[in-house]
Amino acid sequence: MKKLGYEDGKTLFVAGYDWRKMETDEWRNDVRELIEKAVNLTGKKAVLFTHSMGCPFSYIFLMSQTIEWRQKYIQHYVPVSPPWIGTNIIPYIMITKKMLNVTVEPFASLGGVMRFLEGPYILTPSTFYNPDTIIAKTNLGLYTAKNQSLLLERVGVKNAEAIIQHIQKQLYGFKFEHPGIPVTSIWSTGAKTVGQFNWHKDSDIGVKEPIPEFIEGDCLVPHDSLVYADKIWKSGPYANITEGIPIPKTNHGTILTSKITIAYINEVACDSE
């Protein structure tokens, strides 16, 4: 964005968040003040561009504001690589304590740490919208989204069910209501992504690494999760201001530097009132 001429604090504003935790009232107030400041400074509505975990965080932020505020200050909402109903890669990482074949620190150790952080649980497979999603299989049966807490508790996560329900309720409590402003979701296609993972023996859980099975997605988020909100919004009353852009030959990370992604964000920013 800077290469296109955007400047920090003038036309480009970053609303960082502590991904280890869930949103707080203080954070939401800070973001609202930042957006209002940006709009008052530039005289144009803001384009809210978010990526990955930032998508559910930004959606919760938007839906915590009145629709009048959203329509006054936000020109366009652009969630990129949105994990709307979670991803099996999160329980996989928590169980194996590593991100597949990633060996570079600090990412290689994230799995063990993520078990004990609040924020990442918003990315676990949805117990509200897709409870029968298969996460893991052993010779004794299945673990699905609705009983994933049993699997996590077997590897040392205490009170997993209470944590998942508490965290996910903050996102799914809005029932994927459309934010009432123009929305364009952008996601990758064609990258293999962890679907379910299996153990030959149930007793191997926590002892041996599971065997992953791969499905369509963007390397980290499965296709169904990437497009979930887009499908709902396109069938609702705001379908005329809802768009989805799949980008092939990209993945969860490289989509951020895709010429298509950058060009689109710049286009809607230049069209901002």
Image (cartoon, rainbow, N blue to C red):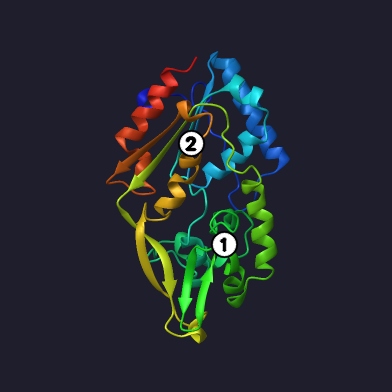
Label 2–label 1 contact, CB within 8 A: no
Nearer the observer: mark 2 or 1; the answer is 2
Look at label 2 and name its amino acid.
Answer: Ser
Residue drawn 57% across the image and 38% down it: 58
Q: Is residue 121 above or below residue 62?
A: below
Between residues 79 and 130, which one lies in front from this camera angle? 130
Between residues 144 and 94, which one lies in front from this camera angle? 144
- What residue sits right under mark 1 in the picture? 114
Left or right: residue 256 compared with residue 179: left
Determine whether the residue tagged by mark 1 lies in a helix, strand or loop.
Answer: helix
Q: Position of residue 220 (x, y in %)?
A: 42, 55
Q: Is residue 229 above or below residue 11?
A: below
Residue drawn 34% across the image and 40% down it: 246
Residue drawn 40% across the image and 63% down it: 194
Residue drawn 57% across the image and 28% down it: 180
User: What separation in Å lies between label 2 and label 1 (alpha carbons)?
Assistant: 35 Å
Left or right: residue 78 compared with residue 24: left
User: Which mark is on residue 235?
Assistant: 2
- Count of picture labels: 2
Left or right: residue 172 compared with residue 237: right
Look at label 1 and name its amino acid.
Answer: Met
- Residue located farthest toward the left when viewing the structure as drawn: 249
- Residue located farthest toward the right when viewing the structure as drawn: 25
Image-quadrant location for residue 116: bottom right
Q: Position of residue 234 (x, y in %)?
A: 46, 35
Mark 2 crowd level (few <14, some 14–19, many ≥20, 10 Å Cα): few
Q: Position of residue 141 (x, y in %)?
A: 50, 79
